[in-house]
Amino acid sequence: MALYEYDCPGCGRLFEKRMPMAEADRATCPHCGNSHPKRRLSRINVKGQASSGGSSAVSFAPGGT
Ligand SMILES: [Zn+2]
């Protein structure tokens, strides 16, 4: 479960909803019942690029020591 933020195009309000990720696009506005609120991404803390094969961080020291 994650907390999502939505913009409702129906009533123009902002609301938050705790939804499982698979249902994140199926939220309905608690104010007007609009079933197509726009999900915002601001609350989602994306932890991307965790050690995905970048080799530039390896520190070679040629001719050292
Ligand atoms: Zn609404």
Image: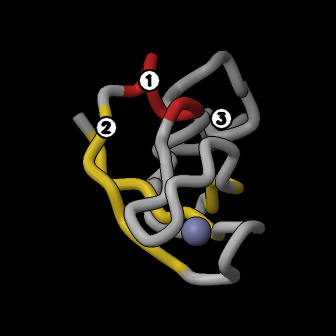
Q: Amino acid at mark 3?
A: Phe
Question: Up-down: is 2 above or below 5?
Answer: above
User: Do the numbered discs 2 and 1 sit on residues whose CB atoms are within 8 Å?
Assistant: yes
Lateral position of residue 60 relative to residue 18, left or right: right
Q: Residue at x 69, y 45 (%)?
A: 36
**Residue 3 falls in image quadrant:** bottom left
Amino acid under disc 1? Glu
**Position in image of residue 49 (x %, y %):** 60, 34
Residue named by callout 2: 19
Measured along the vertical axis of the image, is residue 42 above or below residue 29? below
**Position of residue 57 measured from the top left corner of the image (x, y, whole percent):** 64, 40
Distance between the alpha carbons at the discs numbered 2 and 1: 6 Å
Image spot of residue 25 (x, y percent): 58, 32
**Element under label 1?**
helix
Q: CA distance from mark 1 to mark 3?
A: 47 Å
Instruction: Give me the residue at 61% from left, 58% from top.
Output: 41
The 10 Å Cα crowd at callout 1, few under 14, some 14 to 19, many 20 or more, is few
At mark 3, the secondary structure is: loop
Residue nearest the observer in this picture, 62 or 50? 50
Q: In the rendered view, does 4 fall on the left or right side of 58?
A: left
At which x and y percent is residue 2? 29, 43
Earlier in the chain: of badge 1 and badge 3, it is: 1
Left or right of residue 13: residue 36 = right
Q: How many numbered discs sit on the rendered protein?
A: 3
- Label for residue 60? 3
State the residue in front, 46 or 24. 24
- Examine the rendered structure and indicate whether residue 11 appears above or below residue 29: below
Q: Quadrant of residue 62?
A: top right
**Label 3, label 2: how many angstroms apart (C-alpha)?**
46 Å
Which residue is label 1 attached to?
Answer: 23
Which residue is pictured at 65% across the width and 35% down the height?
Answer: 60
